[in-house]
Image: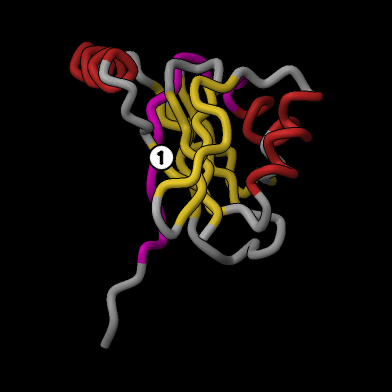
Amino acid sequence: MSIKIILTSVFVDDQDKALTFYTEKLGFVKKQDVPVGEFKWLTVVSPENREGTELLLEPSDNPVAKEYKKGLVAQGIPAASFGVDSIDDEYRRLISLGVTFTTKPTQMGPVKIAVLNDTCGNLIQLMER
């Protein structure tokens, strides 16, 4: 038996805005979009692995979630980390799409990272191994 990560989440200020950013800018594809009261069970996945780990774009209306996100951003801590084949290529592509980075591509030992603002209240780290 092995345990697998099948779902993880980021708290977002606006689910529709987040879906646009995560699909049109980052390149994920929508997997699930199920109404749940005033919000949605809204997930995206990598287009290269549509049956892989889902990212839930979870509403951050809860005051605890708002403070959590605020604290992470204030300390410069990414809410999530995504792998890329070439951080320099992704950085150039995303900059051309208007994405704002708080950290340009930087070598950190065996990995190279960059950190972007997802426009929905989070910092997101990109990592090339």
Judging depth in this view, the residue of 113 and 2 nearest the camera is 113
Does the segment drawn in magenta span residue 47?
Answer: no
Residue at 46%, 54% in the rendered image = 111
In which image quadrant can residue 72 be found?
top left
Residue 40 picture location, percent across and down: 49, 30
Residue 50 position within the rendered picture, expressed as x and y whole percent measured from the top left: 65, 61
Query: What's the image's color scheme?
Result: secondary structure
Q: Position of residue 78 (x, y in %)?
A: 37, 32
Instruction: Examine the rendered structure and indicate whether residue 56 appears above or below residue 31.
Output: above
In the rendered view, would you say 111 is above or below 1?
Answer: above
Q: Is residue 40 left or right of residue 50?
A: left
| Number of other residues with Cα within 10 Å of mark 1, as a class: few under 14, some 14 to 19, many 20 or more | some
Instruction: Residue at 61%, 18% (x, y): give it.
Output: 100
From the viewer's perspective, tell me whether residue 96 is left or right of residue 115: right
In this view, 41 is above or below 39:
below
Residue at label 1? Answer: 80
Which of the two residues, 10 or 33, is positioned nearer the viewer here?
10
Counting from the top left corner in percent of width and height, residue 26 is at: 67, 37
| Residue pictured at 74% horizontal, 44% vertical | 89
Q: Quadrant of residue 98?
A: top right
Q: Quadrant of the N terminus?
A: bottom left
Q: Nearer the viewer, residue 9 or 105?
A: 105
Relative to 55, is 51 on the left or the right?
right
Residue extent of the magenta highlight? 5-18
Spot the residue most to the left. 64
Marks counted in the figure total 1
Q: Could you say whether the residue bearing mark 1 is in a helix, strand or loop?
A: strand
Q: Amino acid at mark 1?
A: Ala
Q: Is residue 10 magenta?
A: yes
